[in-house]
């Protein structure tokens, strides 16, 4: 057993009695009331999931295992001369709750490097797609095609003790997370680049090897590390995390669950918003030629979008009630590295003019920008201008959190998810209309 798995085993053994006690001694305690608005309105804010991987405070933003993003970026070990930490270190933190030492990260990197090779048929699955397929469709299918590799599934078929579910899920999760960057870079090369095939460097970490496979020079390795870490988790209720958890709750393995979470992320109200932001801005850019628009023109563009019954992509959030710290971190990165870039000037102007407009319109509960308003401009600047691909990058990051959650779901024996639905008639009776 690897040292990480051994440590996880001890943490799981220590955690199991806490869940057991909550259930046996306090199972009937009421946590929250549920309103009609919440039931009809997408279950907003109902406290009905447990995860210790991350917590999202509406005003502070996300904490991973209790650490703010600033603490995560400052405290995780980094490659020599790098400003951004190892992605593997973040995965270690999500799994265990501990900031790893350099040696602990090295061990995990070594383990993951040995899991990176893709079966030949996965390349063939990807190659079979027409080149005008959306990359998220190809990613989802490629992940799904690997279901036959699931160790959990194999062991379950042979008869597996419940207490051991997490172990083979851990193996599946490490296999999948190590392969996802390879799948994604191969999709990128197939769809957009003149490079055919894929070239890996086993001496490089997750972010470094991803940049290498994409054929991107430094600092794209740093950009990748920042991107994957920022997108890793946003507590349990968002569509991608919740989908992964829900699918896995039926004991579907991580390949089914991750393919499903990718499909949820592919919606424009969720992860695809990063693509939408760029598409929307490029629309204005093409009308403007090379010029950056005046504030007046930009305001009209925003109002036209709203009056057309569309949302302004990259703004608003179901939980956050302030500017997303993931947005702020990327904004600071842009200010430090390319403050005079034209596309950044667009995004910067939107940062100033959209919130007052959304406030004036009076619908959005949160008028402030979210992570997706800023992430595309960073990718664009460093050469990934094919914005259809941005949600694939998001998927790699998000898989870190979703897979960590599924391992813990199995370890703590969380059951099949099965909320209750009622009819409109019943709701009307409850409120006294009928
Ligand atoms: N532009 C225009 N209208 C908006 C808006 C925006 N950016 N954000 C919210 N609204 C509208 C909603 O559409 C809703 O309108 P209706 O009453 O007509 O249905 C109203 O304001 C109230 O919505 P809300 O309660 O503030 O927001 P929700 O929790 O329902 O939805 C969303 C949250 C993120 C889906 C929403 O803010 C939105 O559509 N934003 C734009 C798309 C986007 O950026 N998505 C990415 C979010 C972050 C994320 O998950 N990344 O992966």
Image (cartoon, grey):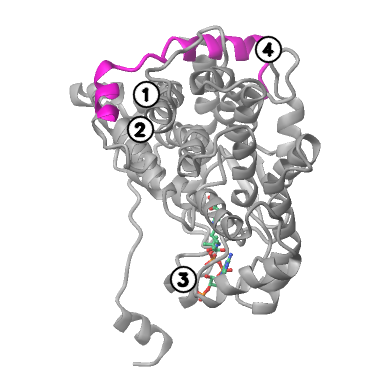
What's the magenta region?
A: 99-127
How would you rate the neighbour count of disc 4 (Cα within 10 Å): few for under 14, some for 14-19, many for 20 or more? Answer: some
Is ligand 1 less than 8 Å from the beta carbon at label 3? Answer: yes
For disc 3, the marked residue is 41
Image coordinates of residue 413 in percent, x first then y, are 39, 37
Q: Position of residue 258 (x, y in %)?
A: 38, 37
Q: Quadrant of residue 216?
A: top right
Residue located beneath label 2 in the image: 254
Work out how far the residue at label 2 is from the one at label 1, CA to CA, in angstroms: 7 Å
- Res. 142 in view: yes
Residue 410 in the image, given as x and y percentages of width and height: 40, 33
- Residue 322 in view of the camera: no
Marks 1 and 3, the one that precedes in the sequence: 3
- Give how far apart the Cα atoms at labels 2 and 3 are: 29 Å
Residue found farthest to the front: 289
Going from the N terminus, do you reach mark 2 or mark 3 first? 3
* Picture residue at 49% right of the left edge, 19% below the top: 213
SS of the residue under disc 4: helix
Callouts 4 and 3 close, C-beta under 8 Å: no
Residue that numbered label 4 is attached to = 102
Q: Closest to the observer: 399 or 122?
A: 122
- Which secondary structure, mark 1? helix
| Residue behind label 1 places its C-beta within 8 angstroms of ligand 1 | no
- The image quarter in which residue 98 lies: top right
């Amino acid at each position: 057993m690897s040292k990480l798995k051994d440590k996880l085993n001890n943490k799981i053994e220590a955690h199991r009695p806490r869940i057991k006690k909550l259930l046996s001694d306090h199972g009937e305690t009421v946590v929250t009331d549920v309103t009609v608005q919440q039931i009809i309105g997408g279950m907003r804010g109902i406290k009905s999931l447990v995860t210790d991987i991350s917590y999202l405070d509406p005003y502070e933003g996300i904490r991973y295992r209790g650490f703010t993003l600033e603490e995560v970026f400052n405290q995780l070990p980094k490659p020599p001369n790098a400003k951004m930490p190892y992605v593997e270190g973040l995965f270690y933190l999500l799994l265990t709750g501990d900031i790893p030492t350099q040696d602990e990260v090295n061990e995990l990197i070594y383990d993951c490097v040995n899991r990176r090779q893709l079966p030949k048929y996965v390349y063939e699955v990807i190659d079979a797609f027409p080149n005008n397929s959306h990359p998220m469709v190809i990613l989802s299918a490629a992940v799904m095609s690997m279901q036959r590799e699931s160790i959990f599934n194999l062991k379950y078929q042979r008869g597996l003790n419940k207490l051991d579910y997490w172990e083979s899920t851990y193996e599946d999760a490490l296999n999948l997370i190590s392969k996802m960057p390879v799948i994604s870079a191969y999709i990128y090369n197939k769809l957009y680049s003149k490079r055919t095939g894929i070239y890996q460097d086993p001496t490089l970490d997750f972010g470094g090897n991803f940049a290498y496979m994409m054929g991107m020079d430094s600092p794209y390795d740093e950009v990748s590390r920042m991107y994957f870490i920022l997108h890793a988790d946003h507590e349990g209720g968002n569509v991608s995390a919740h989908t992964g958890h829900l699918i896995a709750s039926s004991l579907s393995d991580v390949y089914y669950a991750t393919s499903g979470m990718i499909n949820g992320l592919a919606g424009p109200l969720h992860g695809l918003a990063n693509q939408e932001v760029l598409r929307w801005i490029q629309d204005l850019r093409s009308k403007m030629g090379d010029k950056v628009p005046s504030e007046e023109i930009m305001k009209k563009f925003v109002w036209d979008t709203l009056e057309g019954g569309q949302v302004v992509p990259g703004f608003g959030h179901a939980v956050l009630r302030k500017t997303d710290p993931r947005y702020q971190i990327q904004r600071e990165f842009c200010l430090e590295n390319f403050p005079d870039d034209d596309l950044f000037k667009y995004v910067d102007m939107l940062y100033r003019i959209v919130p007052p407009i959304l406030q004036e319109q009076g619908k959005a509960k949160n008028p402030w920008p979210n992570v997706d308003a800023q992430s595309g401009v960073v990718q664009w600047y460093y050469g990934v201008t094919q914005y259809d691909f941005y949600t694939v990058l998001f998927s790699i990051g998000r898989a870190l959190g979703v897979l960590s959650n599924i391992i813990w779901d199995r370890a703590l024996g969380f059951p099949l998810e099965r909320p209750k639905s009622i009819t409109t008639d019943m709701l009307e009776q409850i409120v006294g209309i009928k």
